[in-house]
Image (cartoon, coloured by chain):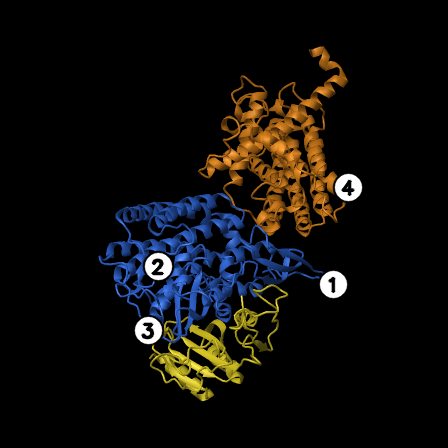
Amino acid sequence: MSMLCETLKEDFLALAPLALVDTDYKAKGYQLDITVAPAQVVEAATIMNRRGYTLEAVTGVDWLASAGPKPAKKAAPAEGEEEPVEAPGAPVAEQMEVVYDYTNTGQELCRVVVRCRIPRANPELPTVSGVFSGANWHERETHDFFGIRFLGHPDLSPLLLPEDADFHPLLKDFRV
Amino acid sequence: MNEPDCNPNQETFVINLGPQHPATHGVLRVKLTMDGEYIVHAEPVLGYIHRMHEKMGENRTWAQFLPNTARLDYLGALSYNHGYVQVVERAAGIEVPERAEYIRVITVELNRIASHLLWYGAFVLDLGGFTPLLYAFDDREHVLDLLESVTGARLTFCYFRFGGVYNDIDEPFITGTRAFIKRLRSRLPDYHNLVTKNIIMIKRLKEVGPISAEMCRRYGATGPVLRGSGVCYDVRKNEPYSVYPELDFDIPVYSECDSMARYMVRMDEIDQCLRIIEQALDKLPDGPVMAEKAPKIIKPPVGDYYGAVEAARGTFGIRVVSDGTNTPYRMKLRSPTFSNLSLFGEASRGMLLADALALMGSLDLVIPEIDR
Amino acid sequence: MMELLEMEPLRLLIFLGGLIAFAALNAAYLVWLERKVAAHIQCRIGPKEVGPFGLLQPLVDGIKLMSKQLLVPNGVDPYLFKVAPLLVLVPAVMSFVVIPFGENLAARNIDLGLLMIFAFASVNVLGLLLGGWGSGNKYAVISAARAVSQNVAYEIPMLITVISLVMVTHTMNLNEIVKQQEGMFWNWYIFRLTASPLMPVAFLIFFICSLAETNRAPFDLGEAESELIAGYHTEYSGMGFGVFFMGEYANMVIGASLATVLFLGGWQSPFGIGSGWWWFLLKVYALIFCVMWVRWTYPRTTLWGLLNLSWKVLIPISLFNLLLTGATIKVVSYLFGA
């Protein structure tokens, strides 16, 4: 674990996230997996911004009960095999997950994933486009695909979908 | 930049650049609010070639999605192949034989050269020079011939498999590649004499379209755009994958932040690609090109995985979420030009139309990759 | 035959027919030549399917253009839209009237030939402006604005250069100017360093200006396709576009002819013997080849770069040349006596 990751961990522990997991880079492709509450995403972005990080992507995952992992295998989809399944931020059915991929362009490598879970029925969370300008389009895209509303976003009109689209194709109950 | 002197009545007009326009190289549309020849506001409008690859990914098996990866960035398709197989191999824990990794690097770098050559031609075409395009295409044709002989395709490659590549390279390919390296090395000085040292070219690119490192960071721009802003960031070095750590190559970085810097980064990268291929050919080990224990049906363990590769245009990131079945639960494709283009609105403010198009050309856009 | 030519109406008819045919043929075959030149510069072959060496390609293209529908889009000003291509072509053809192709081969040998050509050349820009404006297309309007500022900017150094030349020639009669350059090639005005030490520079300025005046690369800002699609003729189809195209090439021929007449000795042979129209055509086409060569080598400048070049470089140099020419004339006449 690099110095940078340690610093970030301290930063985030001060934020009191719902979960903070060191992950095995070789197995997962990122070093830090942090789950925060919806109210904390902007603060998380501010921390990342302060540390010189860049926002690589924002996306969603739709955890619909019927489409989720088979209960026969595991009670709930977990972060990875060796991690405790019942982490407080582990996805449960009828939730949406918003994933922020952060990376830094410096020499030290520490990829950070920030997750946030919101109820599927009312998918709302604050926008981070005030911190990272690039989040603007990523959030618009996520809104297109999942119908997640980013509060305070300057313009949530469809980006990739037709301008009159009223559907969200990446929802698991969207039938092609 | 010269700011518009005065326009007391704020009289502006809107022009639609695209979706069919010679400068957008595809179906990109940019809504430009103009004050005469100055751009007041530029808003890219996307989605004209949106195909929802991410939903397709959720509806087919892991292996069936492979051809889709070539249809994002059709100019550098092998990098996308590479990114996808790499993340699935990471998820499923498949070991790739060394020879296969070397072949991957050789073909990916050849593909990168082809992509940069096409960009070079198209970029100079944007600036009104038609001839370099055909020279570049001439050389690119050689790359495509080489790649065709081993992958069977010229554009939308589907060459990599989970656990290796599907076809071993043969002697004609190796000799052909060596001949090509020699040929391109002799041609690159011509390119520089014809274009890089051209006074008009220099006037049009130097100090035009500045993109600061800070702006790149805020927008998540990567690739040559970032390296043209003085940031030495390349996934091949910063997050070494495949056999890149064993090869000796440099990351070209220019700190001028202008269109010329981005141009030079790509031109130097062609040179570095040749170095990588040369070394990889020298070091190419014997052995199988497919992992023997690679499962026929991939069922990665539950969890989510991230992988990034350096594509020709920047960081191609791919996030897959597996629910343990033979189809992905979620597949997020993070395309570099999506982020690179998102800064166009801010970067082009107050620029002249002609300069803004030089800036847009220097971003090296491939629209299907932006729209996915 | 000569008696027939003395008859004014007949002479008019013959020359009118001849000039229009010359302009049209030139336009058609310069397109072919341009395609061939471009192809060979770019390691290609160029047209080769229609006729030997693709020589019938212009004919086929012409038939295609003529058989296409003349589309007049909604929202255009129909009169301006239709009259604009003619405003580009007709002045170009008219300018041919005074061009001396050979010693006795000019439609009209008038004393103010040079002035007439410049008068007609200024109408050309009106055609571009009206075409762009009348199209009701924003790209076309931008292009029209560019064409006007470009033409205004480049007429000035061009005229100043020509004035300094006229100070040397004492005449605006083109045939007369050619006759003054008789003998070996160092008698051509481009090499007449005793008249003004800057003569080769003057020729260069004239050449650059004629590139800009005829909207040729690298100054083809009016139709910068990567910015303005096709500029002022974006909305034109069929022969409307064809006439614009013919006008462009006719203007190119005029520019090259004028450069030949003023600086390169017109129909005079470079060696003093065997002068005739063949030398004129040879020089004109050699210049046109250079124009094409430039086009397929250089990228396009920007409007700013173009205007800067004119106002900050060409105009000061040509003014200095004017001054120097005047001074040289004074000094020479003082030293050697008039």
Task: Answer whether residue C173 is visible to the viewer in this image.
Answer: no
Q: Nearer the viewer, mark 1 or mark 3?
A: 3
Amino acid of disc 3: Lys
The shade of chain A is: yellow
Amino acid of disc 4: Tyr
Give whichever of C195, B299 is nearer the camera.
Answer: B299
Q: Which residue is mark 3?
A: A26
Pinpoint the chain carrying mark 1. Answer: B
Pinpoint the chain carrying mark 2. Answer: B
The picture places residue C124, in percent across and down from the top left corner, at 69, 38
Q: Is residue B306 left or right of residue C124?
A: left
Task: Measure the C-alpha gap from mark 3 to mark 4.
Answer: 72 Å
In contact (CB < 8 Å): disc 1 and disc 2: no
Task: Tell me the quarter of the picture where residue A154 sits.
Answer: bottom right
Q: Which residue is mark 2?
A: B160
Give whichever of B107, A145 is nearer the camera.
Answer: A145
Amino acid of disc 2: Phe
Task: Answer whether residue C235 is visible to the viewer in this image.
Answer: yes
Relative to residue C223, is residue C22 depicted above or below?
above
Q: Nearer the viewer, mark 3 or mark 4?
A: 3
In the rendered image, residues at marks 1 and 2 fall on the same chain: yes
Give whichever of C102, C30 is nearer the camera.
Answer: C30
Image quadrant containing the N terminus of chain B: bottom right
Q: Which mark is residue C79?
A: 4
In contact (CB < 8 Å): disc 3 and disc 4: no
Q: Which residue is mark 1?
A: B9
